Image (cartoon, rainbow, N blue to C red):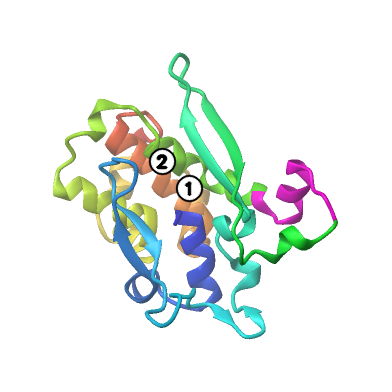
Amino acid sequence: MTPYDILRMKNRLGMDSGEFLAKYTVPVREGGSPLPMLRLKMEESGRRPCPFVREEGCGIYPDRPGACRLYPLGRGASKAESKGADREFYFLVREDHCKGFEQSRQWTLKEWLEDQGAHTYNEMNRPWMEIVTSRSPRLKNLNPQSLGMFHMASYDLDRFRKFIFTTRFLERFHIPEEEVEQARRDDVVLMLMAMKWLSFALLGEMSLKLRG
């Protein structure tokens, strides 16, 4: 799951991010990445269904994760070897339980992405994807403190908000006052600030300006 997925779901449920993570997520290692990833915790019964699926359908449908919006498409993203540019691709996932393949309508990729609201999710997650797909050697030997920092900034937004307002974070970095005030109440602004901090701290990019 991505930062924007978690932001939307925990707000939909009216939960603190730490509470949501503890109840609905499990840590995983994916694709050889050294960075900690999260997966939605499925129910233990039967075919291990999604915890938000009800008889009438998805209980969080307006704020469902990006992967659910894309289905039955899968999405991949990587960096081009030469210029470091983003490469994005989609692929079709065919599964017997998906009834959509029985429908007569045909969709173009553009139509499907627009209909499912996937563009917003892709754009919101782009700064995070640039971090997790980075080929920077700095990511290979991260210490436990750095990995914990990545987890907090990526997933535990309510703890990150406490971090920036109760430590010397705002004394160290020059952030416009308007952005600071927005981050107090707007999770999207806070999330984007967290991504800038991760780019600075983990990749050495000048995504935040140090105070002189």
Q: Residue furthest right?
A: 104
Marks 1/2 in contact by CB < 8 Å: the verdict is yes
At mark 1, the secondary structure is helix
Measured as percent of width and height from the top left, residue 172 is found at 28, 42
> Image point 62% across, 56% down: which residue?
71
In the rendered view, tell whether residue 21 sits above or below residue 128. below
Residue range in magenta is 105-118
Using the image as rendered, state which of residue 27 and residue 93 is in the foreground. Answer: 93
Reading the image, the residue beneath label 1 is: 192
- Determine if the magenta segment contains residue 148: no
In the rendered view, tell whether residue 68 sits above or below residue 173. below
Measured as percent of width and height from the top left, residue 92 is found at 62, 46
Q: Quadrant of residue 44?
A: bottom left
Q: Quadrant of residue 84?
A: top left
Quarter of the picture containing the C terminus is top left
Number of marks in the image?
A: 2
Q: Residue furthest front?
A: 96
> Image point 23% across, 53% down: which residue?
148
The amino acid type found where label 1 is placed reads Leu
- Is 22 left or right of 56, judged from the image as shown? left
How far apart are labels 1 and 2 at the CA level? 6 Å
The amino acid type found where label 2 is placed reads Lys
In the rendered view, tell whether residue 74 sits above or below residue 62. above
Using the image as rendered, state which of residue 152 and residue 91 is in the foreground. Answer: 91
How many residues crowd mark 1 within 10 Å: few (<14), some (14–19), many (20+)? many
Measured as percent of width and height from the top left, residue 112 is found at 74, 50
Measured as percent of width and height from the top left, residue 108 is found at 78, 43
Q: Quadrant of residue 100?
A: bottom right
> Image point 54% across, 29% down: which residue?
87
Using the image as rendered, state which of residue 96 and residue 180 is in the foreground. Answer: 96
Reading the image, the residue beneath label 2 is: 196
Kindly tell me whether residue 150 is visible in this rendering.
Answer: yes
